[in-house]
Amino acid sequence: MKKFFLLSSFLCLMMPQVVLAQSDTTGTGKIEFNDQQQVADPENPVNPIEPEDLIPPSSDLLRLDYVPSLNFSTQKSDTNDQKYAANAMMFADDTMPRAHFIQVTDRRGTKAGWNVSVRQEKQFATAENIELDGAMLSFDYSWTNGSDKNKAPVVKKDIIEMKIGETQEIANAKKGTGDGTWFISFGASQNNSQGVKNTLEPRLDRDDQVIMHDTFNKPLFLNSAIQLAVPGRTEKVIGKPYKTELTWILSELP
């Protein structure tokens, strides 16, 4: 045992001499990142959500992860001018109703900036192309949420009134801002942490009873930040849905 111990010590002492030989070589280290697209709660971005109307995923480094669909529900035909609020966003899990939002992700790493705008391509109309003459869609109470408020895009604070065929700016991230993932909301729930006015409330029927969501079996909410104004003089076709088309545009800054 004693000889073995001495021999082991001798070998250990010799090992540094081998490392210091005149033959050098190099190795490499490698790491790579991917970016899995996921839609999150605009008021609490650490929580993923699954909206009813997900859009096809994109692998672009600058992309729109989500844009909303708008549903103004079935309304009573009226000869007076009316403003109808859109149904708020609802979810199958225990996430509370949310205001409509868009989600933008910028992973380019250049901090070159971007711009988001929207265009209404045509007037609300039936399948037979009977238009809801004079109807005007509007967006209000815009605000942003993201990881670094110092790099937040700037949103338009005035009411955005849509005019057919005209492009309206929603948000602008100047150079040096807007990298990462950002949420641009129209309205908010009463639980939001940024002091935005609550624009959500339960949708009631003609008897002032709460309307239940057809799929989720929980109270349906409306979002007064997005409204459709319809003149009383406009003829309304009963039993025919009116639809429009919105194009959301994400642009790189020059």
Image: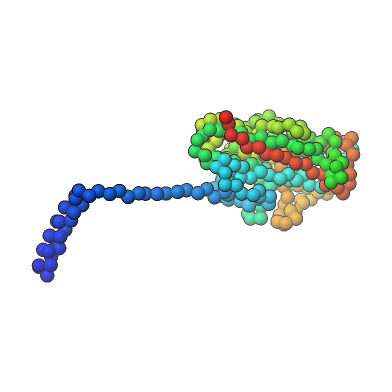
- Asked if 29 appears above or below 197 in the picture, the reply is below
Furthest residue toward front: 23
Identified at 77% across, 34% down, the residue is 164
* Residue 3 x/y as whole percent: 9, 67
Q: Which image quadrant is residue 77 in?
A: top right
* Residue 226 x/y as whole percent: 72, 39
Q: Which image quadrant is residue 144 in?
A: top right
**Horizontal side of residue 46 vs 232, given as left or right:** left
**Horizontal side of residue 166 vs 19, given as left or right:** right
Identified at 75% across, 37% down, the residue is 121
Identified at 63% across, 37% down, the residue is 250
Position of the C terminus by quadrant? top right
Position of the N terminus by quadrant? bottom left
- Asked if 205 appears above or below 246 in the picture, the reply is below
Q: Which image quadrant is residue 172 in?
A: top right
- Asked if 174 appears above or below 78 in the picture, the reply is above
**Horizontal side of residue 222 vs 14, given as left or right:** right
* Residue 56 x/y as whole percent: 64, 49
- Asked if 19 appears above or below 162 in the picture, the reply is below
Q: Which colour assignment does the render follow?
A: rainbow
Identified at 84% across, 44% down, the residue is 126
Is residue 229 visible to us here? no
Front position in the image: 164 or 92: 164
Furthest residue toward bottom: 1
Is residue 15 visible to us here? yes
Count of numbered labels shown in the rendering: 0
* Residue 136 x/y as whole percent: 79, 35
